[in-house]
Amino acid sequence: MDTPANGRLHRDAGGRPRRSAGWLSCATGSAAFLLGMAFSSTAFAQDQQLPVVTAAKPVVRDIIEDDEFVGRFEAVDQVAIRSRVSGYLDKVSFQDGALVNKGDLLFTIDQRPYQAAYDAAKSQVDVAKSLLEFTKMQLDRANELAKTGNIS
């Protein structure tokens, strides 16, 4: 039986089942498309001009290649430097990250407070020497007076 999926049968005027004209319209559309493409590609190729290109002679010379990287360095060996005395730094004799050897001068401490303490201690020594001299003189005098019995 010749029935389509929707249940209706298409027939022509003679009562015969009518064949679909879909293949004819598909063939006509394809032919028109192909003819259009053939004519338009030749017309497009004729309208299209070659682009203007400028060229330069290459320059030959030595170049220096640089690479820059962002990174973080960390030393393999580290040392903590602590002073045995307190004071203000007067001079730093090395750069951060520089190699230093045993015995190298690293810092110079401000000498003024230490010089003042030294001068005060020296003054106290001078006072003590004077007092010792005075006491020796008093002892010698007392010994002389004791020999004569004039000491009280």
Image (cartoon, rainbow, N blue to C red):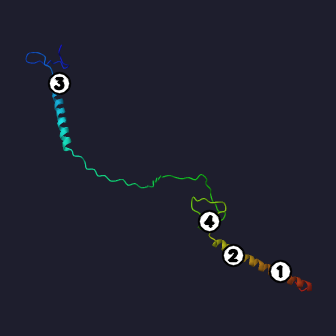
How many angstroms separate mark 4 from mark 2 (CA)? 23 Å
Q: Which mark is residue 19?
A: none
Nearer to the camera, 28 or 107: 28
Q: Which of marks 3 and 2 is in front?
A: 3
For the residues labelled 1 and 4, say whether their Cβ atoms are less than 8 Å apart: no
Nearer to the camera, 13 or 40: 40
Side (left or right) of 140 relative to 66: right
Q: Kindly state the secondary structure of the residue where label 2 is placed.
A: helix
For the residues labelled 2 and 1, say whether their Cβ atoms are less than 8 Å apart: no
- Amino acid type at image mark 4: Phe
- Amino acid type at image mark 1: Lys
Which residue is label 1 attached to?
136
Side (left or right) of 61 relative to 104: left
Which residue is label 2 attached to?
119
Q: Residue at x 81, y 80 (%)?
A: 135
Sequence-earlier tag: 1 or 4: 4
Which residue is label 4 attached to?
107
Q: Which residue is drawn at 80% across and 80% down?
A: 133
Give coordinates of residue 49: x percent, y percent.
Answer: 21, 46
Which quadrant, please, contains the C terminus? bottom right
- Amino acid type at image mark 3: Trp
**Circle 2 Cα neighbour tier, 10 Å, few/some/many (<14 / 14–19 / ≥20):** few
User: Looking at the image, which residue sits at the far left?
Assistant: 13
Which residue is label 3 attached to?
23
